[in-house]
Every structure is written in C-alpha cells, then in structure tokens.
Amino acid sequence: SQQGEEDPQALSIQEGENATMNCSYKTSINNLQWYRQNSGRGLVHLILIRSNEREKHSGRLRVTLDTSKKSSSLLITASRAADTASYFCLDSNYQLIWGAGTKLIIKP
Amino acid sequence: NAGVTQTPKFQVLKTGQSMTLQCAQDMNHEYMSWYRQDPGMGLRLIHYSVGAGITDQGEVPNGYNVSRSTTEDFPLRLLSAAPSQTSVYFCASSPQGLDEQFFGPGTRLTVL
C-alpha cells in the first residue's frame, strides 16, 4: 500500500513558471523527502525536511511541511526544461512508503 | 566513488528461470534496499538490510531472496521468474534507513 500520495498526478506548465506539487501522508513521520526521477532512471534525492521543521529551501526548491495536516508541498521556481521529470515524496517512519509521483512537464 | 552500481542493465528471462541481480555500493552505507517500479507507479520495497548479515522483508517479498554477506553487496535472487515480475528494479543505499537514499541506475527485467 502506498502511504505518501502526490497531487496532482500530472502537471504541465510553461518554462519560467513556478510548479507546485503536494504530498499527503497518513501516519507520523521522522522526516519527509522529495526525489526526482528522469525517464525511468534512478531516483535522485532533492531535499529532506524533518518533522520539527516547517520550511526548507535549496536553490530553486522550497519545501513546506504541515504535520497537523499531514502534508508537504514542493515548489520549483522559475522552471526549466530540465525539470521535466516525475517527483516522488517519501515519508520515512518505521518503513519507507513511496507515493505514486507527480509527472511534471515543462513546455518550452 | 562509483556510488551504487547495478548489473545487468537489461535482462530477458523465460518463465521459470532463475537469476541474480547484483547491487554494490562503495559508500560504506549500512542500509541497503531493493525496490521494484511498475509503469506509472511509485517504488515498492521488496527486501531491505540494515547491515551485513541482517535482512528483512518489505512490502512485496514473494518470489525474491536476498542475502547480505558484506557491507558492500546486496544481491537479489529471483527463484523462478514469472511474468508478474516484469519490472524495473532499483537498488538503494543510505547511511541509515531513514536518511537520504542513493539509487542505482536500475535493471529492466522482462519475463516472457
């Protein structure tokens, strides 16, 4: 069963626009991580936010965490063609449960 | 560092055949795991290991065996391949289970 669920399932935007995707989870977490996957390749870690943090930045990425709503959001600012990928959240508690991902397409 | 390596990259099997997918990491990570990813889906955990000599089952362990005799290697064995095992298999490692996961490039397996 998949505990983390990303929303939307697919997102298509113009290059230069901001992209926001959300992740919801069901139980308490130690941390929540976001990963990117390009075209069926291995996943690449983007950012980790701990349960006692509310917001974290890394370059063009901004992640928020709302433990009361059991949700997280990933914002990619000033999107580029290279951001076209699938994005997954991973909520790590006792076991690692992955969501099904958001497929992001950046149109030139 | 090579990171996490997986071999082979592609494999075609016939139903009933057995094979071993290889995974190795050179980062001295304690935690290693195997996932499968089916089209349009997220990862599902098959087996994982928290250190040499210790393995445990994940979400979908049936039809697969693992062993961890060294910190570096974590092979995944398919005992008797079935078409339902057609998938892309990823190996990952991390310093500890809840930390950043480092992924290999994957093995694309087709079972006919």
Image (spheres, coloured by chain):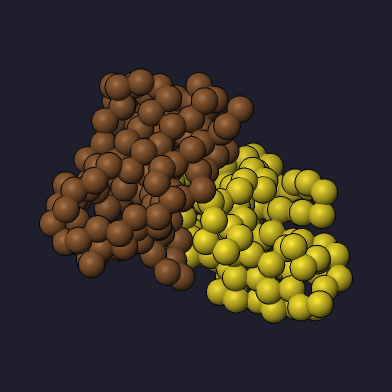
Chain colours: A yellow, B brown
**Foreground residue among B48 and B10:** B10
Q: Residue at x 77, y 68 (%)?
A: A81
User: Is A42 placed left or right of B80 in the picture?
Assistant: right
* B88 is higher (above) or lower (below) than B76: below
The x and y percentages for residue B47 are: 31, 42
Answer with the quarter of the image where residue A6 lies: bottom right
- Residue B26 visible? The answer is yes
The x and y percentages for residue A64 are: 70, 54
**Foreground residue among B83 and B48:** B83
Q: Residue at x 24, y 58 (%)?
A: B13
Q: Residue at x 30, y 51 (%)?
A: B59
Answer with the quarter of the image where residue B2 lies: top right
Answer with the quarter of the image where residue B21 lies: top left
The x and y percentages for residue B102 are: 55, 39
* A36 is higher (above) or lower (below) than A18: above
User: Is B23 placed left or right of B65 in the picture?
Assistant: right
**Foreground residue among B19 and B62:** B19
Q: Residue at x 43, y 50 (%)?
A: B9
- Residue A89 visible? The answer is no
Quadrant containing the N terminus of chain A is bottom left
User: Is A74 placed left or right of B84 in the picture?
Assistant: right
